[in-house]
Image (cartoon, rainbow, N blue to C red):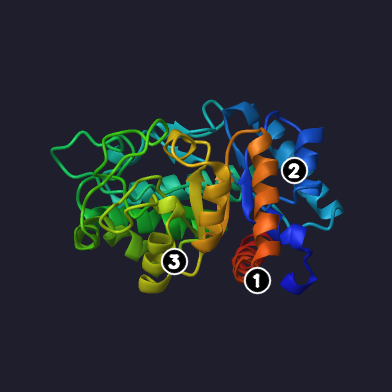
Amino acid sequence: MNINDFSIEQIAGQRLMVGFDGTELTRELMCLIDTLKVGGLILFSVNVKTPDQIKNLCDSAQDYAKSCNQPPLIIAVDQEGGQVARLKEPFFTRFSGNPDMKSEEDAVIFAQTTANELLGVGINMNMAPVIDVTPEGIKSIMAGRTFGSDPYWVSKMGVAVIENMQAKHLMAVAKHFPGIGRTIPDSHLELPVLDIELYDLESFDLIPFYAAIEHNVSGIMLSHILYPKIDEKWPASLSTKIARKLLRDQMSYEGIVMTDDLDMGAIKNNYDLKTAIKQILYAGIDMALICHAGPNIEYSFEQILKNMRDSKEIEMESKKSVQRILLYKEKYLL
């Protein structure tokens, strides 16, 4: 897959990972693939019923992308175990979640079992592991989803999940950079503010992310949290200082960087989509997640196109982003 063979529309579309309605290849889904040329799909409970149905959905989407001369699709799901697991019993193994894991072997079993089950139905990326660290003594919004309060234990467990999923050829995504374990408000509803210095993050929250990067995690998801001591204006998911300067330049991460869902209240209630997309492009973030069907997906595609046409710098950065995305597609999907 040579980036020089891609149209500007293809480059714009590859930078979107989107949700959709339905459990089969509908006209809506076909339009996302053939007209908006999206790089990835994300599945939710509304898209999944049985293993056969999910496999048919994924296979038919991939076949349609191929028929449109599109690269293979990243097809992702949130399958963390515990509180967040889109694929449920009786068809998929139920795990009690990260807080209940007592040994590295628990993480290995979770990762290998989950990889086999996801790949078996055509899903090639898991939005896991959660490697946020939850300090003791605060009512963290993430308490029910993390490995715990010791960053070195979180690192060890996170790396076990990443290595064992990716050894099976399932892409892993570490989240939520640069760490939301200290936050109490829910970014699905509002914009949390974490007023701490960078050295506080480096001595605690960033430790598992350094470990994930060292072990070649395929993707890192940015949080919708404002860290005013690092960037007083933009949350991590829209921040050049966090996405480019901290994650790319300082921490030397070369994988796929993605936002959390732009439909969440933290973004939707504080920033208009036009501004958010422009910030994402300037920050060098590879993929924007828009997890709900609707006009925001097409609007975002048009805004990416417009910004690429208006700015040579953004056009060049977009090509770099898509080259990264294609690298992982070649490694894991072909």
Q: Is residue 71 left or right of residue 81?
A: right
Residue 152, disc: none
Camera-nearest residue between 199 and 150: 199
Residue at 79 percent of width and 51 percent of height? 65
Tag in front: 2 or 1: 1
Camera-nearest residue between 22 and 188: 188
Q: Give the answer, above or below, for where 263 lies relative to 240.
A: above
For mark 2, what is the residue?
A: 32
User: Where is the C terminus found, in terms of image quarters?
Assistant: bottom right
Query: Residue flagged by tag 1: what amino acid is it?
Result: Lys
Q: Is mark 2 on a helix, strand or loop?
A: helix
Q: In this view, does 212 lie to the left or right of 102?
A: right
Query: Residue flagged by tag 3: what amino acid is it?
Result: Arg
Mark 1 and mark 3 lie on one chain; the one further toward the N terminus is: 3
Tag in front: 2 or 3: 3
Q: Position of residue 104 (x, y in %)?
A: 31, 52
Q: How crowded is mark 1: few (under 14 residues within 10 Å), some or many (20 or more)?
A: few
Residue at 85 percent of width and 53 percent of height? 68
Mark 2 and mark 3 lie on one chain; the one further toward the N terminus is: 2
**Extreme residue in the front direction:** 310
CA distance for labels 2 and 1: 26 Å
Residue 312, disc: 1
Query: Residue flagged by tag 2: what amino acid is it?
Result: Leu
Determine the image quadrant of residue 324. bottom right
For mark 3, what is the residue?
A: 244
Callout 1 touching callout 3 (CB < 8 Å): no
